[in-house]
Image (spheres, rainbow, N blue to C red):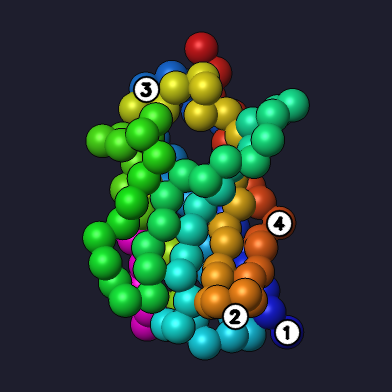
Amino acid sequence: QVQLVESGGGLVQVGGSLRLSCAASGFTFDDYHMAWYRQPPGKQREWVAIITSTGSPPRYVDSVKGRFTMSRDNAKNTVYLQMNSLKPEDTAVYLCHARRGVIDYWGQGTQVTVSS
């Protein structure tokens, strides 16, 4: 059974930090591109960051560059998103995504709320 389980969300003040984790199981993690998406309240889901299966340097949406860092640990089947200097506009449900070709999986998401 495929599972992507996000954790680490919560309530944080402006300028604070959070570290999200996504634990994967049920598929060959090393073969999948892993990404983080987010869905702000009342808005569409947007891509945040990605690490490919080949281990290329992560790529980020412009709005988080320099503040967020994505990493993956293939030994633990886990990806992380270190989020620093958080802003109110970072408030969203953060979802983990795995993709290999036409096959993809989504996690349930973890809520991040940045209060001013």
Q: Disc 4 or disc 3, which is closer to the eye? A: 4
Which mark sits nearer the N-terminus, 4 or 3? 3
What range is drawn magenta here? 71-75
Q: In the picture, residue 42 is in which quadrant?
A: top right
Residue that appears at 38% across and 75% down: 53
Q: In the picture, residue 98 is in which quadrant?
A: bottom right
Residue that appears at 52% across and 46% down: 47
Assess whether mark 1 and mark 2 are in contact (beta carbons under 8 angstroms): yes
Q: Which residue is mark 3?
A: 15
Instruction: Give the Cα distance between marks 4 and 2.
Output: 14 Å
Q: Disc 2 or disc 3, which is closer to the eye? A: 2
**Residue 84 appears in the picture as rendered:** no
Inspect the image, locate mark 3, and give the three-letter code of the amino acid beneath it.
Gly
Residue that appears at 52% across and 22% down: 89
Q: Could you tell me what secondary structure mostly forms the magenta stretch? A: strand
The location of residue 9, given as percent across then percent down, is 56, 43
The secondary structure type at the circle numbered 1 is loop
**Residue 116 appears in the picture as rendered:** yes
Q: Which residue is mark 2?
A: 25
The secondary structure type at the circle numbered 3 is loop
Inspect the image, locate mark 1, and give the three-letter code of the amino acid beneath it.
Gln
Q: Which residue is mark 1?
A: 1
Instruction: Give the Cα distance between marks 1 and 4.
Output: 15 Å
User: Which of these two is toward me, 89 or 101?
Assistant: 101
Instruction: Give the Cα distance between marks 2 and 1.
Output: 7 Å
Which mark sits nearer the N-terminus, 1 or 4? 1
Assess whether mark 2 and mark 4 are in contact (beta carbons under 8 angstroms): no
Inspect the image, locate mark 4, and give the three-letter code of the amino acid beneath it.
Gln
Say left or right for 70 vs 26.
left
47 w.r.t. 96: above or below: above
